[in-house]
Image: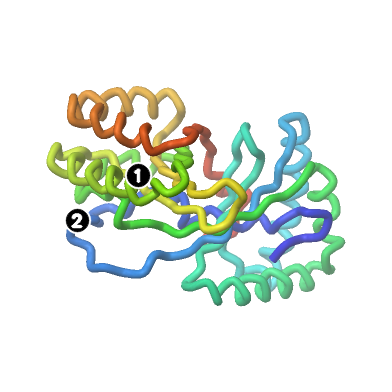
Amino acid sequence: MIRSKAVGLGVLAALLLAPAAGGESHQEAAPQPPPFYYVWTDHVAVADAAAYEAALAAVIDRLKATEEGRKLRFVTLASPQSGYSSVVPLADLGDLARANRDFLAATEAVGGMDAWNEVSRHVSHGSAQLLALRLDLSYLPAEPRAVEATGTLRWYDWWYAEPGEDDDLEAVARRFVELAAAKGSDTGWRVYQALTGEDLPLYMVVTTATDVFEYHANEARIRALMGEAGDKLLAEANACTRRLEHSWSVVRRDLSMDR
């Protein structure tokens, strides 16, 4: 699944960072095992972004012209902080082997690994991560605001839990869900747990918005809705956290292979 020269397949964002489906209710959903997502990031300097995008678009056009390439399903996300990430949804951990085979077959159909050379030239390095969607920690309102179906911005809160306090942080997350449901919040979020990496435990909270300004305006509205109870829960979450980081990305359908 990984290209040569430490560059990964631009294949990883469709389901991982997709907005909540309309009418889906976390509170009423039947228990289910968490889906897994293999995420590859091409770290690209801002100065090289335009050249990278042009090179990636050229490869995608070639993939779309082949039967093998059309089997690939991915959405690319562009971030000024890290570069370009992609997400491969996996039915289970064993499904990673299938995804890898599909990628290799598609690459062979467009001329082999050399097809990625121009893309690789604009990448400083690549990194991979395996994530699990934690629906039990996520809030999916029954009637989400329209932005959650149309917004292309994804806002990320990266919660690095204190060692041994991940269970406490998860307990707070569940109480956040209960509070949001009680308050009738129309803004959902999804929680992903990192299964690989050097700085665990790590949880990523993903929110959908139209742009950064709209995100902050809506966040202020939701914090006011949550009130003092929300502030207390936030303080409890902070007490379980080593580090809290924020970033954002934009869904790039033009650089994706999506149904």
Point out residue 221 in the picture as x, y percentages from the top left corner.
26, 25
Whether 219 is drawn above or below 108: the answer is above
How far apart, in angstroms, are the residues tagged by discs 2 and 1? 19 Å
Q: Nearer the viewer, mark 2 or mark 1?
A: 1
Q: Quadrant of the N terminus?
A: bottom right
Residue at the spot of label 1:
169
Q: Is residue 212 left or right of residue 222?
A: right
Point out residue 108 in the picture as x, y percentages from the top left corner.
79, 72
Q: Residue furthest front?
A: 164
Mark 1 Cα-neighbour bin, 10 Å: few <14, some 14–19, many ≥20 = many
- Which residue is at 18% across, 60% downward? 28
Residue at the spot of label 2:
27
Labels 2 and 1 touching (C-beta < 8 A): no
- Which residue is at 76% across, 46% downward? 125
Q: Is residue 247 left or right of residue 143?
A: right
Mark 2 Cα-neighbour bin, 10 Å: few <14, some 14–19, many ≥20 = some
